[in-house]
Amino acid sequence: MRQYNPNGQPIDNKKLSQPGPYAALVTDDDLEAEAKKRRKGLVFPLEVFPDRLKALIARLVEDLHGERAFIGLTLLQAAASSIGSSLRASTGNWEVCLSMWGASVGISSSGKSMIQGILLKPLNKFQDDYNREYVDKCKSDPDTMHPQKVLLYSDITFESLIRDVFGNNFKGVTRYEDELLKWIDDMDRYKTGKSEASFWTAAWSPSSSFSMRRSNGKLTFIEKNHLVASVMGSTQPDVLYRFYEQNRLATGYIFRMLWAFAETDRVISPNLMFALPQEILDPYYGMISRLFRELKMEDKDSEPQVVKLNRPGIQLFQEWQDRHTITINKMDGLTDKNVKAGIFGKIKEYVLRISLILAAMDWAFWEPDLTRLEKFGIDEQYVAKALKVCDYFLATGYEAYQVAKNKVLVPPQVLEFASLLKAFQHNQTALADHLGVSKQAVNRKLRDYIDKFPSAFGAKNG
């Protein structure tokens, strides 16, 4: 049967049977298969960690079927949280704190919580000790306001975080959520979203101190050297797009997040009879304890140690940066190129951070005095290891964006255009006649919309 467009013009069915490359319809299964194909070969380099941790890592992988990426990210985050604001990494003229935002991404029962539960156990114990200490003080002297020590926290109002936590904790804190989307959702909980997002942005890479005028007119002030706030937790692939909503992609806010993807989407079945031997756990617990207890930031006058990359390390970093810069500049699609550049900008900072975190983990096994780490410097072996890790996170950062942009919310004008295109069975000439514009204008708009909102068209990028 002959078909006609809304102007009464016949539509050429022969043309409709040969849609252009920007209108290739695909299913959700196709998009998922494409994502799996991109993730193939994305393997976290667990060899970067100290030799004394290799036995623990091997047992987590072999006996408990733990995902390598979940293990690697959690190890880095646990060490970063233990160090807090006590160390800063520097090239000499570029200095950064060691805060880390990271999420393990996998389906339900893929072992995210299991790995975090094992590797965060010493940090949870420190927090439990703090909580008991606080309760005991309140019981013994109920008429006095006692400051509470905080290392890990989950549920707290934004004002309390600024006033009570950072007002009394100078080593920084870590927000932990088993389902990390709660961290994002909580920013709108008390209509403080903009202030809270501004705080987290500042705490990720503080170049100056943070101040906020509260509802009572008082000014809350956090000194730059104490402004370290990390984020850790997990999420599922099908809600990944939620992290990119509310302009967090356009502002680059979400580029600060490190994503650890399961190598395959699978439910794991760990050995229920297996228990990690204490002799395998002890080196890890001892390392975390030393980093936490000996690297102190106890009062408002405490200052961090600044540890510098050595010259060969800086040269190695420079070569890596130059290589990736050339690759990104060769990309054709402007939107994807801009996203890749934004991710790269944040990952470069993580090179510095992870270099020092890996060095500090190593030093905790053999250096008797952690209060004098400034004298060492970060040599090129740690930079080389950090570059391996950051190559992984650069790839997963872009993969997270690719997954999210297929589901991110679509503006009404894009939905309207997609609906018209479908009504005309993807015949761009007929649609151009209907809109009273050139076919080239329709094609340009289609390219732009598909690049930014492929989910509206169920299409692959051409």
Image: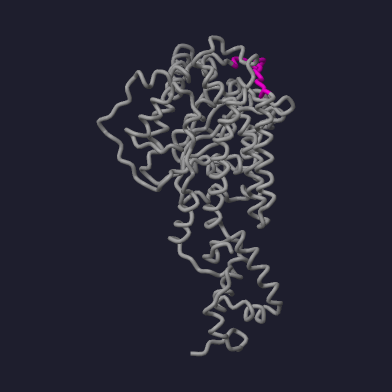
Q: Quadrant of residue 275?
A: top left
Residue at x 37%, y 34% (from the top left corner): 61
Q: Which is more toward the observer, 83 or 32?
A: 32
The answer to whether 338 is drawn above or below residue 221 in the figure is: below
Q: Could you say where residue 320 lies in the image, as x and y percent from the top left?
A: 65, 37
Can the viewer see residue 89?
yes
Position of the C terminus, as image quadrant, is: bottom right
Residue at x 65%, y 43% (from the top left corner): 324
Q: Could you say where residue 353 lies in the image, as x and y percent from the top left?
A: 61, 29
* Scheme of image coloration: one colour
Q: Could you say where residue 147 lies in the image, as x and y percent from the top left?
A: 55, 19
Can the viewer see residue 128?
no
Count of picture labels: 0
The answer to whether 178 is drawn above or below residue 19 in the figure is: above
The answer to whether 231 is drawn above or below residue 239 in the figure is: above
32 relative position to 253: left or right: left
Q: Could you say where residue 288 lies in the image, as x and y percent from the top left?
A: 48, 20
- Does the magenta run of residues contain 303? yes
- Does the magenta run of residues contain 300? yes
Q: Write down the region rendered in magenta.
A: 297-310
